[in-house]
Amino acid sequence: MPVVNLTPHAVTVVDESSRVIRCWPRCDEPARVEAVRVPVGLEVAGVPLMAEERTRANLPEPQEGVWFIVSSVVGSAHPERRDLLVPSDLVRDGKGVVTACRSFVISGSPVRGRAAATAAATVTGERIGA
């Protein structure tokens, strides 16, 4: 199954021994969510508080059998989508910079029971994008 990276960063997936499983190049036109901030008229310790509303991302339409790698912000802005993969179990270097991930989270509602096992087998067992 094809996997398309819609983030501005290369996405590298490694196993528990830090061996690279797969890498997807960065996207030149990544999916983005914009935030509109409005002052709420309150302060905490002299710091103004804001309300924030996020926009929808510029995602492609769902395509049968295609997964899209997106940021957690984009995934959260589209809970109805079941084709979005968010990098998870992030691996960081000595300076705290993310260098890879070990898994993906499927966007949308939590999956339970048999559906969870099926989703896990699909994502891991079939080696999506291999």
Image (cartoon, rainbow, N blue to C red):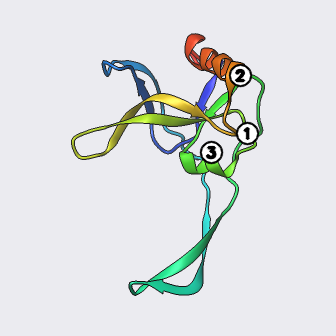
Q: Which amino acid, mark 2?
A: Ala
Location of residue 28 in the rendering, given as x and y in whole percent from the top left corner: 54, 44
Per the model, the C-alpha gap separating discs 3 and 1 is: 8 Å
Residue at screen point 66% across, 21% down:
119
Cα–Cα span, label 2 and label 1? 16 Å
Image point 64% across, 18% down: which residue? Answer: 117
Q: Earlier in the sequence, mark 2 or mark 1?
A: 1
Mark 1 surroundings within 10 Å by alpha-carbon count, few (fewer than 14), some (14 through 19), many (20 or more): some
**121 w.r.t. 77: above or below:** above
Q: Is residue 63 above or below residue 126?
A: below
Give the mark toward the camera: 2 or 3: 2
Relative depth, front residue between 107 and 113: 113
Mark 3 and mark 1 residues within 8 Å of each other at the beta carbon: yes
Q: Residue furthest left?
A: 94
Q: Where is residue 7 drawn, in percent x and y?
A: 53, 42
Of the two numbered discs 2 and 3 on the same chain, state the one appearing first in sequence: 3
- Judged left or right of residue 124, residue 119 is right
Marks 1 and 2: in contact by CB < 8 Å? Answer: no
**C-alpha gap between disc 2 and disc 3:** 20 Å
Q: Amino acid at mark 3?
A: Gly
Which residue is nearer to you in this view: 117 or 108?
117
Q: Which mark is residue 81?
A: 1
- Which percent across, then down, holds residue 38? 61, 79
Judging by the rendered image, the residue that carries numbered circle 3 is 75
Q: Of discs 2 and 1, which sits in the foreground?
A: 2
Residue in view at x 35 percent, y 20 percent: 16
Placement of the C terminus among the 4 image quadrants: top right
Which residue sits at x=73%, y=39%?
Answer: 81
Quarter assignment of residue 6: top right
- In the displayed orientation, state which residue is furthest to the front: 113
